Image: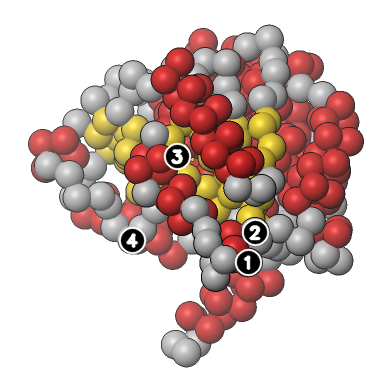
Amino acid sequence: MMDKAIINFPEQFKFEPVITGDWRPVKYQNYIVCGMGGSHLAADVLKLLRPELNFIIHSDYGLPRVASEALKNSLVIISSYSGNTEEAIDGFRTAQALKLDLAVVAIGGQLIELAEEHKIPYVKLPDTGIQPRSALGFSLRALLKIIGDEELLALTAKLSEQLKPLALQSSGQELAEQCQQLVPVIYAARRNYALAYNWKIKLNETGKVPAFYNLLPELNHNEMNGFDYNELSQDLAQKFIFIMLKDRQDEARIAKRLEVLTDLLTQRELPVMAIEPKGDSQLETIFNSLLLADWLAYYTALQYEADPEAVPMVEEFKKLLANGV
């Protein structure tokens, strides 16, 4: 089913989100998005698209520790694809106890029930049976509706025709072959955190492999030194492959750092691949990058005879947690 989810991904941008409940569009000073795993990916992307907005992404119980005055001028958006995420429900209850403005995004579950019970506005996502990490289009359009960004709603709608997942399939398969028996490390500029993190979790959840990410320029001050191996540590360093997410909008100083870092790693005979997806717009470029990551993760799973769809360790963890083990 995962390959179908990738192929059908552009269809998600035809989704017309509807806010149920008493809702009056207001421009807030802050937006706090509470969500775990795939349920906060849309907010990550939105921060990239709208850097001028103050988006606080909270992946934990409760709410972030910010000044009480800032909380009063915030809209708290509780995002849980299933509607049953423990941390998200706790965030809902915390925000409600503080009498903060609230909105909910989910396919159903306890959160939609709570929203209806307490007359909290919500957007109900289509329940198509896909994994939360695959529902980025649905989630992004829901967030855009809630924050009242009609411009981006109109632009994202065009992605249903602009994105061509099958055109990226062979590149993703080739990339997976190059990464075989190596641990991928994703590097990008800090402004592209959303992409680097998304690549990493797709490899973890879909590919079922260890994968890591870090951001420039910070990693140039610490992490890269971990790969300056000697004879005793050579075997450790050579277990990794580096994927550099380049962006034509990268600041010149960051682009230079990527080049120099690539040279240093290559001199040490460590494999490096530069990835620079193209598109006619920032939106198209972002989602071409993420579709390529989807295919990489999908074929990575097939290489290791793993199920790209299921997340059995997550489910096992939830059961143990519920049983108090």
Tell me which numbered mark, 3 or 2, is placed earlier along the sequence: 3
- Please state the horizontal and vertical placement of residue 94, each as a whole percent of the image: 26, 56
Distance from the alpha carbon under mark 4 to that under mark 1: 39 Å
Q: Is residue 167 left or right of residue 105?
A: right
CB within 8 Å, label 4 to label 2: no
Nearer-the-camera pick, 202 or 186: 186
Residue 234's quadrant in the figure? bottom right
Q: Which residue matches tag 4?
A: 61
* Residue in the image at 52% along x and 15% along y: 249
Distance from the alpha carbon under mark 3 to that under mark 4: 26 Å
Here the colouring is: secondary structure
Viewer-side label of 4, 1: 1
Amino acid carrying mark 3 in the image: Leu
Tell me which numbered mark, 4 or 1, is placed earlier along the sequence: 4
CB within 8 Å, label 2 to label 1: yes
Distance from the alpha carbon under mark 3 to that under mark 1: 24 Å
Q: Which residue matches tag 2?
A: 238
Distance from the alpha carbon under mark 2 to that under mark 1: 5 Å
CB within 8 Å, label 3 to label 2: no
